[in-house]
Amino acid sequence: MITTLTLPRLFDAHVHFRNDEMLQLVVPFTAKYASHAIVMPNTRPRAILTAEDVVWYNSEIERTLDQLRPRPNFKPLMTIEIRDNTTPEIVARAHKVGAVAGKVYPLGVTTNSNEGLRNFFSKESLETFEAMQFLGMPLLIHGELDLPRTLVTKREEVFLPTFLRLADRFPKLKMVLEHITTKAAVATIRHLGPNINATITAHHLCTTLNDVVGDGIRPHNMCMPIPKDFEDRDALISAVISGNPKFFLGSDTAPHPREKKECARGACGVFSAPILPELLAEIFEKANGLSYLEEFACDFGAEFYGLKPATEKITLIKEAWTVPEIYGNVVPFMAGEALQWKLL
Ligand code: NCD
Ligand code: ZN
């Protein structure tokens, strides 16, 4: 039986660090075990939209890292949000100051998407995507649409035709369909070219809709895209233990204060950062796929962003522990539950 697991520091291709006190609370978790993370731009009150925002937000994160002892060997990789009024100039300037990708939130599909993109195929959007294709700057997409008479469980599937149209229109644009949750999305990514990839979260590998609303309402399991059916989860697991570089880790760790989750209209987002390597080890072991974990969580994401996997290692040992009920004022994923692996 394997009782020790050594991995390079992880490459987490999708994190929410927020700002102010929340930033200070959550950054140390990811910085403890990741070499890089792609930092999402949907912050409030200041969203990350321009070069100036990127520089400001990056310095906020670096300042937080500087306060940690020892300073972790972790580098945040910045993004901007692509909206209807984003221009090729905005994109080029942000790219120049280090934004590695642009992120699209279709209007109204998730936390802080109230100013999200309305039209993927407007003249302005097409020019922006063209500029990104030219710069080799990946387009990260929250792949859901909030359409009339469409259940929240169907929002990912109804987005796929839009995604296919984009892939067809921009054959060289690097795209990532973020946090995929359906069998249909897995199949779509598999049959598109090597420039088209997807991130997968740890929580979607171990939850279904039942874990959100099947046994009481469990707000800390609620996220967008909403966890789906068993066969969808099976397809996600098959994808991550297939050794296919198109599928890589993007945890979508998305902290919210407890009172924003446990209320009449709770926020969407799962805070997985405090348990991420441990949870992944457990999921991959259970699926008889531990040998695929390193590629999925360390190599493929780094490769996509043109980086080498980290040389510094992390170690996990087989030792059961119970996930704390709360960190600061944020309830983590699997609070109060046992995990079998522990990060040293
Ligand atoms: C994320 C958040 O809280 O910012 N929420 C979520 O449910 N996943 C946004 C996102 O990635 O959709
Ligand atoms: Zn997210």
Image (tube, rainbow, N blue to C red):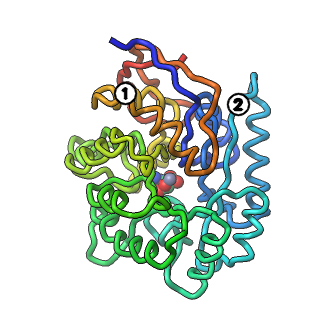
Residue at the spot 55% in from the left edge and 34% down from the top edge: 10
Which residue position is annotated with label 2? 73
In depth, the one of 248 and 149 nearer the eye is 248
Q: 157 left or right of 299? A: left
Residue that lies at the very extreme toward the bottom in this rendered image = 123
Which residue position is annotated with label 1? 290
Number of residue marks: 2
Q: Earlier in the sequence, mark 1 or mark 2?
A: 2
Residue type marked 1 = Leu
Residue at the spot 40% in from the left edge and 55% down from the top edge: 224
Which image quarter holds the N terminus?
A: top left
Residue at the spot 38% in from the left edge and 41% down from the top edge: 243
Residue type marked 2 = Asn
Looking at the picture, how far across and down is residue 80, in whole percent? 65, 62
Q: Residues within 10 Å of mark 1 (few under 14, many from 20)?
A: some
Looking at the picture, how far across and down is residue 222, in whole percent? 37, 48
Looking at the picture, how far across and down is residue 246, in whole percent? 43, 51
Where 109 sits versus 38, above or below? below
Where 187 sits versus 234, above or below? below
In depth, the one of 57 and 191 nearer the eye is 191
The answer to whether the beta carbon of the residue marked 1 is less than 8 Å from any atom of ligand 2 is no
Task: Name the secondary structure under disc 1.
Answer: helix
**Residue 333, disc:** none
**Looking at the image, can residue 300 be seen?**
yes
Residue at the spot 58% in from the left edge and 62% down from the top edge: 138
Looking at the picture, how far across and down is residue 173, in whole percent? 54, 68
What's the CA distance linking mark 1 and mark 2?
Answer: 25 Å
Q: Residues within 10 Å of mark 2 (few under 14, many from 20)?
A: some
The reply to whether the C-beta atoms of the residues labelled 1 and 2 are less than 8 Å apart is: no
- Foreground mark, 1 or 2? 1
